[in-house]
């Protein structure tokens, strides 16, 4: 099993846009092969930080997810909404 965590800080005037677009693709991602969990959360201690949590059956399933048309379109659409890199970590459960 693969766990992915992402901490992101969208530009303030795009935070709600990002949340909306993420929630728009959630039902599509939830139907993908190998998707166990795919969620977004707001950090209540800091106004601008978001936390994404993903759980996948395998690295192969995650790789296929990242290559889908809806994800490549999503990344293109939201890419300019950040002025710093997202902090992404991937873990394999043994």
Image (cartoon, rainbow, N blue to C red):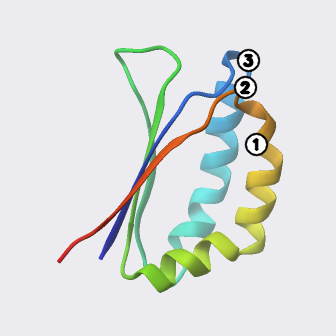
SS type, badge 2: helix
Residue in view at x 81 percent, y 60 percent: 73
Q: Are marks 2 and 3 in contact (CB under 8 Å)?
A: yes
Residue identified by numbered label 2: 14
Separation (CA) of disc 3 from disc 1: 12 Å
37 up-or-down from 63: above or below? above
SS type, badge 3: helix
Residue identified by numbered label 3: 13
Query: Percent x, y for residue 76?
Result: 82, 52
Please identify the quarter of the rendering in which residue 69 is found.
bottom right
Query: Percent x, y for residue 89?
Result: 40, 53
Q: Is residue 57 left or right of residue 80?
A: left
Residue in view at x 73 percent, y 17 percent: 13
Q: Are marks 3 and 1 in contact (CB under 8 Å)?
A: no
User: Observer-nearest residue: 9 or 32?
Assistant: 9
Q: Residues within 10 Å of mark 2 (few under 14, many from 20)?
A: some
Q: Are marks 2 and 1 in contact (CB under 8 Å)?
A: yes
Query: Percent x, y for residue 53?
Result: 40, 52
Q: Residues within 10 Å of mark 3 (few under 14, many from 20)?
A: few
Residue identified by numbered label 1: 78
Separation (CA) of disc 2 from disc 3: 4 Å
89 up-or-down from 72: above or below? above
4 up-or-down from 64: above or below? above
Q: Counting residues from the N terminus, which is met first, the one under dot 3 or under dot 1? A: 3
Separation (CA) of disc 2 from disc 1: 9 Å
Q: Counting residues from the N terminus, which is met first, the one under dot 2 or under dot 1? A: 2
Residue in view at x 56 percent, y 40 percent: 86
Q: Is residue 56 left or right of residue 26?
A: left
């Amino acid at each position: 099993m693969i766990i992915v965590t992402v901490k992101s800080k969208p530009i303030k005037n795009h935070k709600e846009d990002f949340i909306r677009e993420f929630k728009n693709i959630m039902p599509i991602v939830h139907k993908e092969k190998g998707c166990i969990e795919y969620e977004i959360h707001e950090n209540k201690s800091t106004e601008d930080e978001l936390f994404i949590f993903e759980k996948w059956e395998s690295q192969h399933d995650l790789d296929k997810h990242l290559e889908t048309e809806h994800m490549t379109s999503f990344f293109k659409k939201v890419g300019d909404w950040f002025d710093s890199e997202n902090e992404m970590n991937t873990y394999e459960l043994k």
